[in-house]
């Protein structure tokens, strides 16, 4: 057919890449669930062998402790995917009332250095940036601040669309931020 461009592939859009990554991460989560089920079956088998006397418990416990230490070290260094479970950040109620703008010169927005996972809603909006090396954690600059924190002013440039974690965070009793919130004494 003349003029038919169906054989010409369309360019890959950033949304396609994001959707593909999310699909891969969903599959990974499902794989982890299957692994958890296999672990449960394995432990049930070991417990049965110990209960019936086929496996000496002291020998098993010694080997298990050694293996657990080795696996804990390995797992800690493995990448993993996390999503915040909030459904609708715009529907959150009873948010903390803190005059952040007045306190920014004191605290220098230290809360904007915290690392946390975004929600599916954040990803769907495609406004808040995440760290591709650590899906789906908030994106960060080289200085450790959130990519949406304006250097110099410390203001959030996605304030209206900010994540649920930012909306619900209450710094008043956080010793990483304040020595004394009421007296306006920032932590060192």
Image: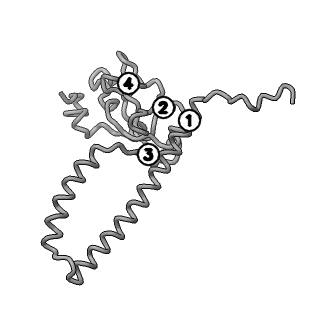
- Mark 4 and mark 2 lie on one chain; the one further toward the N terminus is 4
Q: Disc 3 on helix, strand or loop?
A: loop
The residue furthest right is 1
Cα–Cα span, label 4 and label 1: 25 Å
Cα–Cα span, label 1 and label 2: 8 Å
Q: Which residue is mark 2?
A: 128
Cα–Cα span, label 3 and label 2: 13 Å
Q: Position of residue 54 (x, y in %)?
A: 22, 80
Quadrant location of residue 95? top left
Q: Quadrant of the N terminus?
A: top right
Q: Position of residue 103 (x, y in %)?
A: 32, 25
Q: Is residue 51 above or below residue 66?
A: below
Cα–Cα span, label 1 and label 3: 14 Å
Q: Which residue is mark 3?
A: 83
Number of marks in the rendered image: 4
Image point 47% across, 55% down: which residue?
A: 30
Q: Is residue 183 above or below residue 136?
A: above
- Mark 1 and mark 3 lie on one chain; the one further toward the N terminus is 3
- Mark 4 and mark 3 lie on one chain; the one further toward the N terminus is 3
Q: Quadrant of the C terminus?
A: top left
Image point 26% across, 75% down: which residue?
A: 47
Mark 1 burial class by Cα count in 10 Å: few <14, some 14-19, many 20+: few
Q: Position of residue 116 (x, y in %)?
A: 37, 39
Give the label on residue 101, or none. 4
Image point 34% across, 36% down: which residue?
A: 115
Q: Disc 2 on helix, strand or loop?
A: loop
Q: Are marks 1 and 2 in contact (CB under 8 Å)?
A: yes
């Amino acid at each position: 057919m003349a003029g038919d461009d169906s054989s010409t592939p369309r360019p890959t859009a950033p949304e396609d890449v994001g959707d593909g990554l999310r699909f891969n991460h969903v599959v990974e989560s499902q794989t982890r669930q299957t692994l958890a089920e296999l672990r449960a079956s394995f432990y049930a088998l070991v417990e049965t062998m110990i209960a019936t006397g086929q496996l000496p418990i002291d020998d098993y416990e010694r080997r298990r402790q050694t293996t657990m230490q080795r696996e804990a070290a390995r797992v800690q260094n493995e990448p993993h995917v996390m999503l915040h479970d909030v459904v609708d950040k715009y529907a959150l109620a009873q948010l903390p009332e803190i005059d952040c703008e007045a306190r920014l010169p004191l605290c220098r927005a230290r809360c904007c250095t915290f690392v946390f996972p975004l929600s599916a809603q954040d990803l769907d909006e495609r406004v808040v940036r995440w760290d591709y090396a650590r899906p789906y954690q908030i994106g960060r600059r080289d200085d450790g601040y959130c990519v949406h924190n304006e250097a110099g002013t410390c203001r959030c440039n996605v304030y209206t669309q900010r994540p649920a974690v930012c909306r619900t965070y209450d710094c008043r009793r956080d010793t990483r931020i304040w020595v004394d919130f009421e007296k306006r004494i920032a932590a060192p």
